Amino acid sequence: LGVILAVQAPSQDQASYAFADVFVTIWVGSTVVTLNALLLHGKVSFFQTVCVLGYCIFPLVIAAFCAMLLRVDWLKVVLVAVGLAWAAGASVGFVAELVPEDRKLLGLYPVWLFYAAIAWMILLA
């Protein structure tokens, strides 16, 4: 995703910022999701969260790649919306296993916020 957004940047300087932004957002987002799950008395490790969130972000990567190739603004919005819904839906099963049943929505909120931030970065690229 970082490379896809960096390729779309207008200058080399902005390309490095785009790549760094994706890199930092994914690591910080994974940290926040892990800490949130641990505070909700879930049983999860940091690297497990990074792996699962990375797996679930794949629909957004495909949406960014298709939007880069097609370069149609309204289609980009549709592709990113579908990718966001797919990524958020894929993460529900992961979070449901991590946190107690009565705190499931509290566990899902930062995950969905994480994917919304990634989707917003794709839309702004």
Image (tube, rainbow, N blue to C red):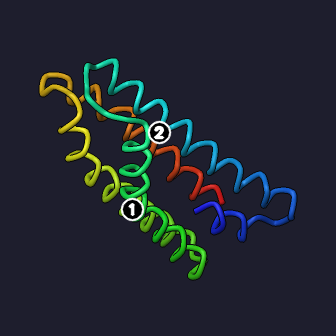
Helix, strand or loop under label 1: helix
- Expressed as whole percent of the image width and height from the top left, the position of residue 47 reads 43, 43
For residue 58, side relative to residue 64 (left or right): left
Residue that lies at the very extreme toward the bottom in this rendered image: 70
For residue 85, side relative to residue 65 (left or right): left
- Expressed as whole percent of the image width and height from the top left, the position of residue 104 reads 20, 30
Mark 1 to mark 2 CA distance (whole Å): 19 Å
Name the residue beneath numbered marker 1: 83
- The amino acid marked with disc number 1 is Gly
**Rendered view: 90 above or below 1:** above
Q: Residue at x 79, y 57 (%)?
A: 16
Sort mark 1 into few (<14), some (14-19) or many (20+) by Cα contacts within 10 Å: many
Q: Residue at x 41, y 33 (%)?
A: 33
Residue 13, quarter of picture? bottom right
Name the residue beneath numbered marker 2: 30
**Rendered view: 100 above or below 50:** above
- Expressed as whole percent of the image width and height from the top left, the position of residue 8 reads 71, 69
The mark tally for this picture is: 2
Mark 1 or 2 closer to N-term? 2
For residue 26, side relative to residue 10 (left or right): left
